[in-house]
Image (cartoon, helix red, strand yellow):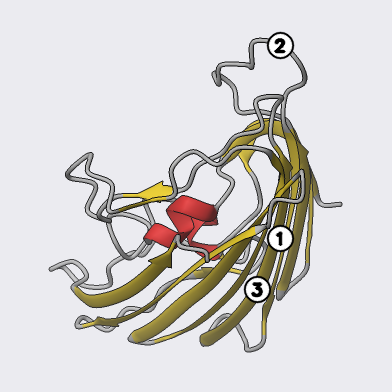
Amino acid sequence: PNNIALGQFKEPFSLEDQTSSKDMTFMERASPVDVFSPGRALGIGLDDHGERRSLSAGLFGEPVGDAPADEGSEGWGMAVRGTLALTPVDRYILHLGASGAYREPDSERELRYRAGPESHLTSVRLVNTGKIDMVDDSRTVGLEAALAGRPVSVQGEYIRTQVKRDGGTPALSFHGWYLFGSWFLTGESRPYIASDGTFGRLIPEGDWGAWELALRYSALDLDDR
């Protein structure tokens, strides 16, 4: 491996989740990414990369600061993400990627998925599964793609998660996706970091800064029959 990480860090999952909040196109991440991405946890991770590819994987416990269950075992999980750039990264980029995550909850065996508006200006939850009990594990997969070149870019992701339960209780399945496009009026292009499979910080080329128009549509379905 090129790098080994030990401590609390983001589990490898999702293009938008792995992109720094300083470098994203929008102020907030799309709701499917916010809801389904594992986030940060204490663990160990390995990553390997080449000129146009990246592969990251890790084994994780609970996030630091989470209140442990009153008794019994803590939860654990693992995650993996791979990316590939199909075109020369110094001109324009066609990015493809896939992620997978598995997690067993702590001894309370509960979880919940919920989301508010992507503006994060209110605590109101627009969608909410409520507390799901008798959880054995959750399994999440994600597909991602992006096309970026001067001065336009398009990016999208699809994420699906399945919650497996015990006692003959049917499994639950939820999903979400987003798609956005952007256009730099001042001619810049989003810089791509092939070793991470993410987009980096934009440096304006003119004295008046960089001006960008962007539009995103996202959908999140937390219902299951």
Residue that badge 2 annotates: 71
The residue carrying pointer 2 sits among few (fewer than 14), some (14 to 19) or many (20 or more) residues within 10 Å by Cα, namely few
Q: Is residue 199 visible?
A: no
Camera-nearest label, 2 or 1 = 2
Identify the amino acid type marked 2. Glu
Q: CA distance from mark 1 to mark 3?
A: 11 Å
Tell which residue pokes out farthest to the front in this image.
168
Camera-nearest label, 3 or 2 = 2
Nearer the N terminus, badge 2 or badge 1? 2
Residue that badge 1 annotates: 100
- Left or right relative to 27: residue 48: right
Identify the amino acid type marked 3. Gly
The residue carrying pointer 3 sits among few (fewer than 14), some (14 to 19) or many (20 or more) residues within 10 Å by Cα, namely many
Q: Residue at x 27, y 72 (%)?
A: 205
Q: Nearer the viewer, residue 58 or 159?
A: 159
Q: Residue at x 43, y 43 (%)?
A: 130
Q: Are marks 1 and 3 in contact (CB under 8 Å)?
A: no
Q: Nearer the viewer, residue 98 or 210?
A: 98
Residue that badge 3 annotates: 97
Above or below 40: residue 55: below
Q: CA distance from mark 2 to mark 1?
A: 29 Å
Above or below 15: residue 213: below
- Secondary structure at badge 2 equals loop
Q: Residue at x 47, y 61 (%)?
A: 200
